[in-house]
Image: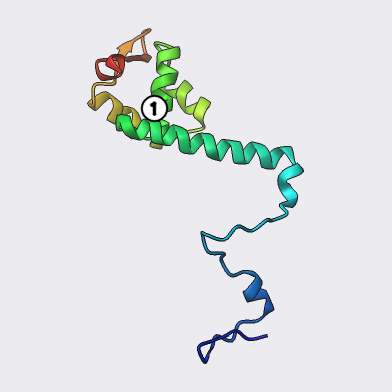
Amino acid sequence: MDIECKGIDFGMNDLAIRNLRVRKDEQVSLNIPLEGYLGYQLRRASVAMQKHLSSLYKKLGFKVIEGSVLLMIEANPGIKQSQIGKTFDIKSANLVPLVGFLEKNDCIERKPIDGRSHGLFLDGLWQKL
């Protein structure tokens, strides 16, 4: 079946017609077979929470991961950078600039906690928030 509109043949088959996007003002009742699966529901909830969290952190000038790291440091003063990396599954190469950014912006500070390790503590800006 081809679609024709004002004399223009769009050459769309049945599959393409079914895949057309619905206009925003049209209500379509869809049967979503995945709704009965817990994994699907958890994923949808996760996406919704991530959007909400992102909007909150954006108002403060942070990305979600930066805010999450700050919350982790707040809950665990003196935590090592490597522990944060393991917790959030962040590679060291990606965590170093993130921690550097937070330190540069007076959100955290590093302090020696033993002979070789430094712990991360909240500093300045984040404590005011």
Q: Which residue is mark 1?
A: 67
Residue 33 lies, in percent from the top left, at 75, 51
Residue 63, by quadrant, is: top left
* Amino acid residing under circle 1: Gly
**In percent of the image, x 51 and y 59: which residue is there?**
24
Q: Can residue 23 be seen at all in this image of the molecule?
A: yes
Q: Nearer the viewer, residue 61 or 98?
A: 61
Q: Is residue 104 left or right of residue 1?
A: left
Question: In the rendered image of this protein, does residue 14 appear above or below residue 50?
Answer: below
How many circles with numbers are drawn on the protein?
A: 1
88 shown above or below 32: above
* Nearer the observer, 4 or 84: 4
The image shows residue 15 at horizontal and vertical percentages of 67, 75
Left or right relative to 22: residue 14: right
User: Taking 50 as reference, is 35 left or right?
Assistant: right
Q: Residue at x 63, y 75 (%)?
A: 17
Question: Which residue is most to the top?
Answer: 114
Q: Position of residue 52 (x, y in %)?
A: 46, 34
Q: Quadrant of residue 29?
A: bottom right
Which quarter of the figure is the C terminus placed in?
Answer: top left
Badge 1 marks a residue whose secondary structure is helix
Mark 1: give few (<14), some (14-19) or many (20+) Cα within 10 Å. Answer: many
The image quadrant where one finds the N terminus is bottom right
Residue situated in front as seen by the camera: 113 or 90: 90
Q: Is residue 92 visible?
A: no
